[in-house]
Amino acid sequence: MKILVINAGSSSIKFTLYETDGEKLLAKGLIERINTPNARLRYSNHRDQKIENDISANSYEAAISQACLALMDKNAGVIDNLTEINGIGHRVVHGGAAMSESARITGVIKQIIMDCFALAPLHNPPNYEGIEACEHLFPNISMVAVFDTAFHQTMPPAAYTYAIPHEIAEKNKIRRYGFHGTSHRYVALKAADLLGKSMDELKMITVHLGNGCSITAVNRGQVNDTSMGLTPLEGLVMGTRCGDIDPAVVIFLRRLGYSLDEVDKLLNKSSGLLGLSGIGSNDMRDILQAIDNNNLQAKLALDVFVHRLVKYIGAYAAVMNGFDALIFTAGIGENVPRVRAMVCEPLEFLGIHLDQARNKANEYIISCDGTAPLAMVIPTNEELMIARETHRILMA
Ligand code: ADP
């Protein structure tokens, strides 16, 4: 089956075409700056042929049409006709409490996605627009929504409930939802596969460290807890987001005269590694470089980042009564042995012992033979997970 995966963001669309037989990536691309005069398409196929063009894309539909032209290009294309596409999988960030599974897109599912606009105002509206654009462009192709929040809906009430008045929480749907679920699920499945076990036999702590960062306790296939909450602001220190703080910091800032929008921007866009380090970058490579140049503020930024993460790992070990594997993924998790070493060193009391050479080489298993829990590095692949889910739902 050929499955097109669409990840429609606020100003860009990522698209990936998979042949699910053998899980072969046929082509992928990115259209940036949609709805501006400077829209640009970047595309490559499995033969490493590339297309890079300024394009006209004043709507999501126009942008996806351009993606289709690239997929059918006479040189770099991978299909002759759009009818070769058997299904489309859409990344949807928020499915609320209603969606604990991926689902074929129907009027009811579209309404659920719309009902979550207020919970994910930056993500669900463009996700929805991507779906509508595809409905116009591909009226005869079945589509599936794969929700970032779905995997986390197995969380028990004790983990997803905030200790605020029950009626207010209930009325306004205020609870922990969790995000990055597609990534946490993918790496947990892949780790189990590599270990020759099923997810149901393992207790895993999955750590997604990209620009956004989150950690999940995956207990025999069920999520016991996850660090992101009502929004993706809670939990770990991230590139520009603060993660956990005393909620009274918000009240304090408001009393000092900061507007709601200013506080929102401060916590989401100016905090985390960027705000702590003061080096004008949230990129881990720049933070490490600054530390090597004796920048003490950058060192503090990394120390806060690692301390928070170690704290969560300890908490999730307690929540699951021990664990079998600690799994690192995403940009930082997959590529930065130094950060992994800093995280694992204080966890030796739990039995984690890194093999320095394996860690440096980003191997799948980076802990020493004969030690447990395992420490692992698993590159995430959210697009492949969406293609798999789309295939599964359409075949059901
Ligand atoms: P996103 O959440 O945007 O998908 P990524 O998963 O690509 O983010 O992760 C981005 C982060 O990963 C950045 O902080 C970047 O510095 C870091 N990163 C990616 N590759 C490397 C690398 N080779 N060395 C150090 N840091 C890296």
Image: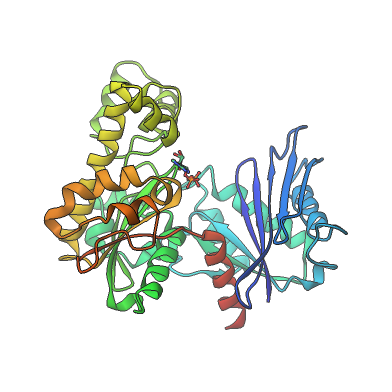
In the image as oriented, which residue stretches furthest toward the bottom?
A: 396
Pick the quarter of the image with the N terminus. Answer: bottom right
Nearer to us in this view, 244 or 240: 240
Picture quadrant of residue 378:
bottom left
User: Can residue 230 be seen in the rendering of this structure?
Assistant: no
Pick the quarter of the image with the C terminus. Answer: bottom right
Is 76 displayed left or right of 382 in the figure? right
User: Can residue 68 be seen in the rendering of this structure?
Assistant: yes
Nearer to us in this view, 263 or 209: 209
Is 383 displayed left or right of 53 in the figure? left
The residue positioned 51% from the left and 60% from the top of the image is: 381
The spot of residue 82 in percent (x, y) is 81, 67
The residue positioned 34% from the left and 68% from the top of the image is: 154
In the image as oriented, which residue stretches furthest toward the right?
A: 74
Is 61 displayed left or right of 309 in the figure? right
The spot of residue 196 in percent (x, y) is 36, 79
The spot of residue 189 in percent (x, y) is 41, 70
The residue positioned 47% from the left and 70% from the top of the image is: 101
